[in-house]
Image (cartoon, rainbow, N blue to C red):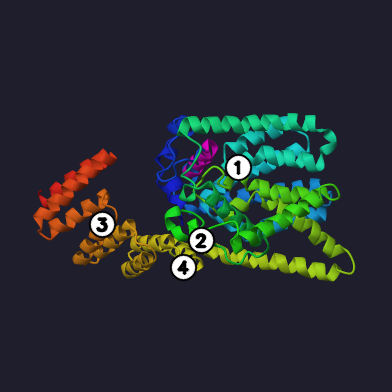
Amino acid sequence: EFLMDDRDFIVEWDLIRDWNNLPQFFMDYTPPAGQEGIYSPLKTLFHAANYHLFGFNPFGYHVVSLIIHCLGIFFVYRIAELLTENSPAAFLAGLFFAVHPVQVEAITYMTASIDMIGIVFLFAAFYLYIKRWYKRFFLFSILAVFTHELSISLPVLFLWYDLCLRREDGIRKIILRVLPLIVLVGVYAWIKASVLGGLTRGSYVADSFYLTMLITIKAWAKYIVLLFAPFTLTHNHIISKGISSFDQTDFDPAAVTSQSLVDPQVLLSLLLIGAFVVLSYKRFYSKPLISFCIGWFFISLLPVSNIIPSGVYFGERYLYPGMLGFCVLAGIYGYQLSTQKPFKIFGILLVTAAVIAFSIRTWERNKDWRNEIVFYQSAVKANPQSALMRNDLGLVYTRFGKLPQAEESFQQALTIRQDPVTYFSLSEVYTQLQYYDKAIKALETAISLNPQYAEAHYNLAGLYAYSKNKEKALYHFDRSQELFRQQDPMIELRQMENSFKTYFGL
């Protein structure tokens, strides 16, 4: 089924329905509702192509996703072969990349898999860069940057490669090679800012760069842990108590503001990250490939580090480019353990066990993506203190007509956080169950939490009209009109006014 952002980018995005909109993919760009701040014109092109090929048939999208992943595996293998000059080690690198469980979100999630086309372009560009086919590499670099924003780390990634493994070329040649990539990213940023009016998506957590970076430190440590121990996999991770993968409104404000550099989790995270940085530094001259792989992993995460606010603080799919560095290292050490005495048998058993364990976990993780109900049930199980996940599960239950379960889920969300939108959703459940008094009470609570909630006033007017309370119905209807005019969805306002007159004669 289509899940989460699939509805925004595939099911409900009018822009991709008509090829006559093609110029708008690049300029005069309109992201899907709720996805403001995204500018990826080639990704939009691929979404349009998918839609015109498959319509709303998820099977076709999954076939495309598997093709994308196969291309990613191919380039990881070829890059590893060039870097290690060892085909068996490269094969292991490709195998780990293929079966690692964190890849599921990047590939099974249909919207994310289109993003990964940009990472495949990045891998292709890097392969061509290693081969010194510079004209072709620059073409794929353009494709990468304009398909997925994760690729904007490309200049730093390639510079790091040269500094680690081609330093004999001299710093002047290296800078001249990377300079066009810096210009490319600058041009992309300029176009995005011109089209969308800025580069950010949202703001820093609690409007604080410092607090946001503390979250990033903890998130990066969690990324490292997931590479080696991908046990708890979910769409909305607990980064630390009261802080999750995305949506600041779902955070515990006290947990956010109480963060500091001396928190035990922050210190442990810095220690873990620092250990890999020190290892990279110590191996820079003696074993530069190790240094390169570690650096590649961290550099690949820079675009999602929230130096420029993105509104998302953790995502398994963001590991897709960085997995190249991890898998090359895994391939090297897996091969060494499997071929050198006295560890040969142990190494073979360890590599085999890791591949089997990763494959089983990948199979199990894919089950979470079967349908929306299973997906959000697994998300709630992994992050039970997320009011957002319980609210989303309630919405899915409502959509499928499971109203008692929806009521329970919304009530659980409200015990965690008092939210007007959740009360609004709960009122719709009560209305469908014909519990009109409860629906009215839920809407009144929503309005008390957010007096500017136009939709709540409108629905409350309808319920009061149904209950023959004309005075309150007119009050809330007039109030909803006033608020809708201020918020300017005039078409919706006219539709509501016409329907209200039709049904209630007011």
> Going from the N terminus, do you reach mark 2 or mark 4 first?
2
Identified by mark 3, the residue type is Ser
Numbered label attached to residue 384: 4
Dot in front, 2 or 3: 3
Identified by mark 2, the residue type is Trp
Residue at mark 3 to residue at mark 4: CA–CA distance: 27 Å
Numbered label attached to residue 312: none
Q: Is residue 41 magenta?
A: yes
* Residue 133 located left or right of residue 242: right
Residue 372 drawn at (x, y percent): 44, 61
Residue at x 16%, y 46% (from the top left corner) = 478
Residue at mark 2 to residue at mark 1: CA–CA distance: 23 Å
> Going from the N terminus, do you reach mark 3 or mark 4 first?
4
Residue neighbourhood size for the residue with mark 1, other residues' Cα within 10 Å, grouped as few (<14), some (14–19), many (≥20): many
Q: Which residue is mark 3?
A: 448
Q: Which residue is mark 2?
A: 369
What are the residue bounds of the magenta stretch? 40-51
